[in-house]
């Protein structure tokens, strides 16, 4: 449980840093910070950076809750749809690797995330992401459902 408490302090510090310096570092409207709930990472915070074109992003997120903490690295490909608040297509495919850090002796190992999602832009700066798909456990070769709902702020 000590890992989860320490991890939440690190998340909070990262979140404050990104809010304060993200716009100066990454440029206007290319950087998103988010917080949300999902499976397998329960509660999480994350960041996404938009590459040169409006159709590709890279992201990282940190999560925790209950008996597990997680770190994820993801690639997003925005491929279809229209939003009046953003030039980026709102439908996306996400592929990534999640590493679960259990708070017990049970080893979970890395997992491959495959998800479809949608940005629901409420304004030019604020919105929600809804996503769902499959998670493949690399160690046990088992399939699990993956889902998430995230609030984002575009810096």
Image (spheres, helix red, strand yellow):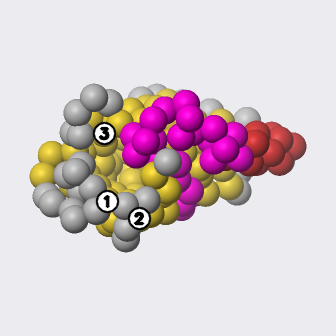
Asked if the stretch drawn in magenta spans residue 22, the answer is yes
Q: Position of residue 153 (x, y in %)?
A: 49, 56
Asked if the stretch drawn in magenta spans residue 7, the answer is no
Q: Residues within 10 Å of mark 2 (few under 14, many from 20)?
A: some
Q: Nearer the viewer, residue 115 or 18?
A: 18
- In what element is the residue under mark 1? strand
Q: Nearer the viewer, residue 155 or 99?
A: 155
Q: Can I make out residue 21 in this image?
A: yes
Which of pointers 3 and 1 lies earlier in the amino acid sequence? 3
Q: Which residue is mark 2?
A: 127
| Residues at circles 1 and 2 in contact by the CB criterion of under 8 Å | yes
- Kindly report the distance in space between the C-alpha atoms of the residues bearing marks 3 and 1: 12 Å
- Kindly report the distance in space between the C-alpha atoms of the residues bearing marks 3 and 2: 17 Å
Which of pointers 1 and 2 lies earlier in the amino acid sequence? 1
* Picture quadrant of residue 6: top right
Which of pointers 3 and 2 lies earlier in the amino acid sequence? 3
Tell me the number on the disc at residue 77. none
| Residues at circles 3 and 2 in contact by the CB criterion of under 8 Å | no
Judge from the rendering whether residue 70 lies leftward or rightward of residue 126; answer left or right: right
Q: Nearer the viewer, residue 63 or 39?
A: 63
Magenta segment boundaries in residue numbering: 16-42
- In what element is the residue under mark 3? strand
Q: Residue at x 70, y 56 (%)?
A: 66
| Residues at circles 3 and 1 in contact by the CB criterion of under 8 Å | no
Q: Residues within 10 Å of mark 3 (few under 14, many from 20)?
A: many
Judge from the rendering whether residue 35 lies leftward or rightward of residue 84; answer left or right: right
Judge from the rendering whether residue 13 lies leftward or rightward of residue 153; answer left or right: right
Q: Position of residue 75 (x, y in %)?
A: 34, 34
Q: Which residue is mark 3?
A: 76
Tell me the number on the disc at residue 119. 1
Q: In the rendered view, would you say 148 is above or below 102?
A: below
């Amino acid at each position: 449980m000590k890992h989860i408490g320490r991890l939440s302090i690190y998340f909070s510090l990262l979140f404050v840093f990104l809010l304060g310096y993200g716009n100066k570092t990454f440029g206007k409207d290319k950087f998103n910070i988010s917080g949300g709930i999902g499976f397998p990472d329960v509660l999480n915070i994350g960041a996404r950076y938009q590459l040169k074109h409006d159709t590709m992003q890279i992201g990282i997120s940190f999560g925790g809750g209950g008996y597990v903490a997680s770190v994820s690295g993801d690639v997003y490909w925005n491929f279809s749809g229209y939003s009046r608040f953003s030039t980026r297509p709102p439908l996306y495919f996400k592929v990534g690797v999640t590493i679960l850090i259990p708070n017990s002796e049970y080893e979970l190992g890395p997992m491959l995330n495959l998800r479809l999602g949608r940005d629901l832009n409420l304004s030019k700066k604020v919105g929600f992401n809804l996503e769902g798909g499959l998670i493949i456990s690399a160690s046990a070769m088992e399939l699990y459902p993956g889902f998430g709902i995230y609030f984002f702020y575009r810096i």
